[in-house]
Amino acid sequence: MANETYIQAVGQFMNELLEGDSDCFLVEVRIKPTNNFKVFLDADSGMSIARCVNFNRALYKKIEEAGWFPEGDFSLEVSSPGLDEPLKLWRQYRKNIGRMVDITFQDGSQLNGKLLDVTEDGCVVEETKGKNKKKEVITHSLLFDNIKQTKIQVVF
């Protein structure tokens, strides 16, 4: 089977496992040449390690039962996307309202600000420029089509 076929099949297995869990959703499936499957899940309420472990076990069993790797020469990692992973789905944007984001546009320009809202085709970000008396707050309505990537900013 080609990698794309494996990715689609694993995605389908994962979506079947997620059917009973309306809080959790599939973000992405990747495969490395060594038959190492990486499955990224997210949840509106956040992904716990225990949840990832349970989904990993159930998905591993489905892959074994499919008989794709009779020698058992595959590995599986189920995790939530880390902070270094850009947001990929509308639902991820929605769950991160109120957080600081770094947005890179298709033209390479960037914007840092607070994610205020998410619409069907874009998002609203509040940018703060300057400090004290020179402080200026600008609200931007952005279309997803113009956004290359959005990452959550870690604020301490």
Image: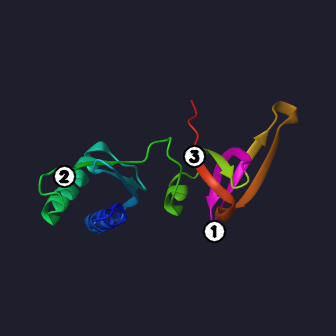
Q: Could you say where residue 36 lies in the image, as x and y percent from the top left? A: 29, 48
Residue type marked 3 = Lys
Q: Residues within 10 Å of mark 3 (few under 14, many from 20)?
A: some
Which quadrant of the structure image shows residue 3?
A: bottom left
Give the magenta range: 108-126
Q: Could you say where residue 23 lies in the image, as x and y percent from the top left? A: 37, 60
Q: Distance between the residues labelled 1 and 2?
A: 36 Å
Numbered label attached to residue 121:
1
For the point 12% across and 57% down, the residue is 70
Quick check: marks 1 and 2 in contact, CB under 8 Å? Answer: no
Q: Could you say where residue 110 lies in the image, as x and y percent from the top left? A: 72, 46
Residue that label 2 marks:
57
Q: How far apart are marks 2 and 3 (CA)?
A: 29 Å
Where's the N terminus, which quadrant? Answer: bottom left
Residue type marked 1 = Asp
**Residue nearest the viewer, comparing 2 with 23:** 2
**Residue nearest the viewer, comparing 17 with 48:** 17
Marks 1 and 3, the one that precedes in the sequence? 1
Task: Indicate whether residue 117 is drawn in magenta.
Answer: yes
Task: Indicate whether residue 64 is drawn in magenta.
Answer: no
For the point 64% across and 62% down, the residue is 144
Q: How far apart are marks 1 and 3 (CA)?
A: 18 Å
Numbered label attached to residue 151:
3
- Label 3: which secondary element: strand
Residue type marked 2 = Arg
Decide: is 107 above or below 50: below
Numbered label attached to residue 8:
none
